[in-house]
Image: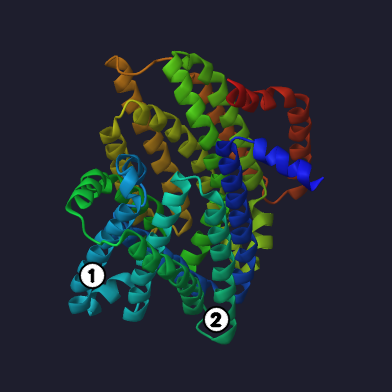
């Protein structure tokens, strides 16, 4: 039996093995994150959990400045361009990150009192954060290189080990101190520093150089122009929690952070779908059969919308089970944030065309516009209403982001630079309107669990009747 399974596995194409392994790894990561959430929300007060939320938000923003996202962007093209110098490229990128981290410290240390007040964190946490960012980048570089070379086994093992060690270390520290918010931060940070530190040294020993003029010029020349896009996206995703912490305190930031994380849990489904869908879609564009994509794009939108409605309709129960009764005030945030995921999918549809026709400038402008609107709306509404307003400002900003990317694609079409029949815009708009209406109905029925269950069962019956049509969408992606 084992030998038969081994033979069947060996017969599977390498690309399929790799994508399957990464998909399973991603699901396991999400499961670990999902099941550790209720543990920490019950061990920590809402104020302490808010400390961790704010730390993560600032970490994501500062990462852009001290790494320039060099583990992404230019990395894949560099692995092709410098095929014989891949290890040198990795160690050289670490040299750039070391230089940028040192520069950040050089600015931070003389004005640490001002920066600490601005970030609302003590000096030692800022130093830990910078070490975590630097060493995590080393790990990401190693993983990106191994992914490119299809060395998926080592990547999966390290990813799962890191995903297990971090929550265990955090749990141990949380149980040993009263400063549980700080312990949660340090537990995860120390785990990432330990694992990433190993690969930091490994990459340097393997590549044997931290500076190479040609490699530095290529990496910086590619990624620096994308800095505005990366930064606007991070600000877009993280500014909510930082501004909530400023206006409403860490407890409110914790409420929003828990709701946001639960609402966005289905992003891994979106990423998995996109991983299979994009290559198929680009193949159709190359063949001149863009119209084949219309039904597929709409089918994915329907399926994703149904999954999101499950989260929205049962948000009160999900919050109570996963976070506890102390987080019931976060329930109204789940729906608008979850609705934003469908808009993110719509945006990705248009971005796929922008990337295919190499129009990145318009994407950057759309990101900046959405980020600015999000910040302005937050500054206006959070002090007047509450942290719940941030969920709706996120939703509005994603509407703008999707619309701006649609206008970008429409501009390409009008100038004859893109196909005009890749999407059925009217059908996608109709699906979105029905989705918003169903989401609103679910929110109105939050106090009526029985009615929500009855309606859900009716929908499941309809889905079962039309199951062949839904499954046909994914068979189309796989077979064409």
In the rendered image, which residue does mark 2 sit on? Answer: 173
The picture quadrant where one finds residue 359 is top left
**Residue pointed to by mark 1:** 102
Q: Residue at x 55, y 46 (%)?
A: 268
Q: Nearer the viewer, residue 206 or 107?
A: 206
Callout 2 touching callout 1 (CB < 8 Å): no
Q: Quadrant of the C terminus?
A: top right
Q: Nearer the viewer, residue 147 or 348?
A: 147
* Residue 332 showing in the rendered view: no
Q: Which quadrant holds residue 295? A: top right
Determine which of the numbered discs, if any, sits on residue 256 in the image.
none
Q: Secondary structure at mark 2?
A: helix
Task: Please say if 86 is above or below 326.
Answer: above
Q: Residue 315, how many percent across, how many down?
A: 63, 52
Tell me if mark 1 has few (under 14), some (14-19) or many (20+) residues whose alpha carbon lies within 10 angstroms of its own.
some
Looking at the rendered structure, the number of numbered marks drawn on it comes to 2
Please determine whether, in this image, residue 304 is positioned above or below residue 217. above
């Amino acid at each position: 039996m084992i030998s038969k399974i081994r033979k069947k596995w060996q017969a599977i194409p390498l690309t399929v093995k790799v994508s399957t392994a990464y998909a399973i790894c991603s699901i396991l990561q999400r499961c670990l994150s999902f099941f550790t959430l209720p543990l920490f929300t019950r061990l920590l007060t809402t104020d302490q959990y808010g400390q961790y939320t704010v730390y993560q938000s600032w970490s994501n923003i500062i990462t852009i400045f001290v790494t320039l996202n060099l583990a992404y962007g230019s990395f894949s093209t560099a692995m092709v361009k410098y095929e014989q110098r891949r290890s040198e490229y990795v160690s050289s990128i670490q040299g750039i990150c070391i230089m940028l981290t040192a520069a950040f410290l050089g600015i931070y240390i003389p004005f640490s009192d001002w920066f600490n007040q601005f970030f609302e964190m003590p000096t030692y946490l800022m130093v830990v954060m910078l070490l975590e960012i630097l060493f995590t980048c080393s790990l990401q570089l190693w993983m990106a290189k191994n992914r490119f070379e299809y060395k998926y086994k080592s990547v999966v093992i390290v990813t799962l080990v890191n995903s297990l060690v971090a929550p265990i270390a955090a749990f141990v520290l949380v149980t040993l101190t009263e400063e549980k918010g700080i312990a949660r931060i340090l537990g995860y940070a120390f785990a990432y520093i330990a694992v990433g530190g190993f690969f930091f040294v490994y990459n340097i020993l393997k590549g044997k150089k931290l500076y190479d003029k040609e490699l530095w010029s290529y990496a910086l020349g590619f990624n620096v122009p994308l800095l505005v896009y990366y930064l606007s996206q991070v600000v877009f995703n993280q500014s909510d929690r930082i501004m909530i912490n400023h206006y409403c305190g860490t407890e409110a930031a914790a409420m929003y952070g828990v709701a946001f994380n639960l609402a966005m849990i289905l992003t891994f489904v979106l990423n998995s779908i996109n991983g299979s869908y994009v290559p198929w879609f680009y193949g159709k564009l190359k063949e001149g059969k863009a119209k084949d994509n219309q039904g597929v794009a709409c089918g994915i939108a329907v399926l994703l919308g149904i999954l999101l409605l499950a989260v929205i309709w049962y948000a009160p129960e999900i919050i109570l089970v996963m976070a506890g009764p102390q987080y019931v005030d976060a329930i109204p945030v789940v729906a608008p944030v979850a609705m934003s995921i469908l808009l993110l999918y719509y945006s990705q549809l248009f971005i796929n065309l922008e990337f295919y026709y190499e129009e990145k400038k318009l994407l950057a402008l759309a990101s900046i516009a959405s980020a600015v609107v999000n910040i302005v709306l937050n500054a206006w509404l959070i002090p007047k209403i509450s942290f719940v307003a941030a969920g709706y400002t996120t939703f509005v900003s994603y509407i703008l982001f999707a619309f701006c990317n649609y206008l970008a694609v429409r501009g390409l079409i009008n100038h004859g630079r893109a196909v005009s029949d890749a999407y059925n815009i009217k059908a996608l708009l109709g699906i979105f309107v029905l989705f918003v209406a169903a989401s609103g109905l679910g929110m109105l029925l939050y106090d009526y669990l029985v009615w929500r269950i009855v309606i859900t069962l009716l929908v499941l019956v309809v889905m079962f009747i039309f199951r062949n049509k839904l499954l046909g969408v994914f068979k189309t992606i796989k077979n064409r």
